Image (cartoon, grey):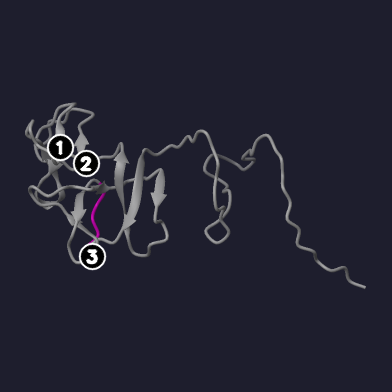
Amino acid sequence: MKPKNKIMNLTLSIGNIVNNNTGNGVGNIGSTTNYFNTIFSTTYTGAHADLAEHYQGDQNYSPGTVVVFGGEKEITASSWGDRAIGVISTNPAFMMNAELEGGTFVALKGRVPVKVLGKVKKGNRLFAGTNGVAVVADPQAVDVFAIVLEDSNEL
């Protein structure tokens, strides 16, 4: 007589989860089809630096493009005076709304490259310019969305 398979729910109590694969970035906890519902943690360390959300763009934009709500879908490249929501992310650490098909990740907070028109200095405040680039804000500007972290003399 063949034994029947029995599905069991177990609770494991362990000290650490260790990656025993051949290197960093090899191995996952869960999968796209069998994921964990809630993760409780006091800290998280990641190699990437931004909080991003998936949005539908009216076209494909390159990383660093300043975007706003609008266009034919959810987001579009900024125009002068628009209120920027963020920039197209390069490597998001946290990816919200990740299941959205056909979208792109917009960095809402964190350290990300930004396309800028003109010279900038560390500490300059940025607001949306034309064609998805940022420009240095006037000191009284209210639509500032970013602060420059390093000087750039590129035009």
Question: Which kind of residue does numbered mark 2 sit on?
Answer: Val
Task: Determine the residue located farthest toward the bottom in the rendered image.
Answer: 1
Q: Position of residue 85 (x, y in %)?
A: 23, 48
Task: State the separation of the CA atoms marked 3 and 1.
Answer: 25 Å
Q: Position of residue 58 (x, y in %)?
A: 21, 63
* Magenta region: 59-63
- The reply to whether dot 1 and dot 2 touch (C-beta < 8 Å) is yes
Q: Nearer the viewer, residue 12 or 87?
A: 12
Q: Secondary structure at mark 2?
A: loop
Picture quadrant where residue 4 is located: bottom right
For marks 3 and 1 on the same chain, the one whose residue lies earlier in the sequence:
3
Q: Residues within 10 Å of mark 2 (few under 14, many from 20)?
A: many
Question: Which kind of residue does numbered mark 3 sit on?
Answer: Lys
Question: Looking at the image, which residue is at 23% across and 55% down?
Answer: 61
For marks 1 and 2 on the same chain, the one whose residue lies earlier in the sequence:
2
> Label 1, on which residue?
126
Q: Residues within 10 Å of mark 1 (few under 14, many from 20)?
A: many
> Label 3, on which residue?
73
Q: Please state which of the two labelled residues, at mark 1 or mark 2, is closer to the viewer.
A: 1
Q: Nearer the viewer, residue 125 or 40?
A: 40
> Label 2, on which residue?
114
Question: Which kind of residue does numbered mark 1 sit on?
Answer: Leu
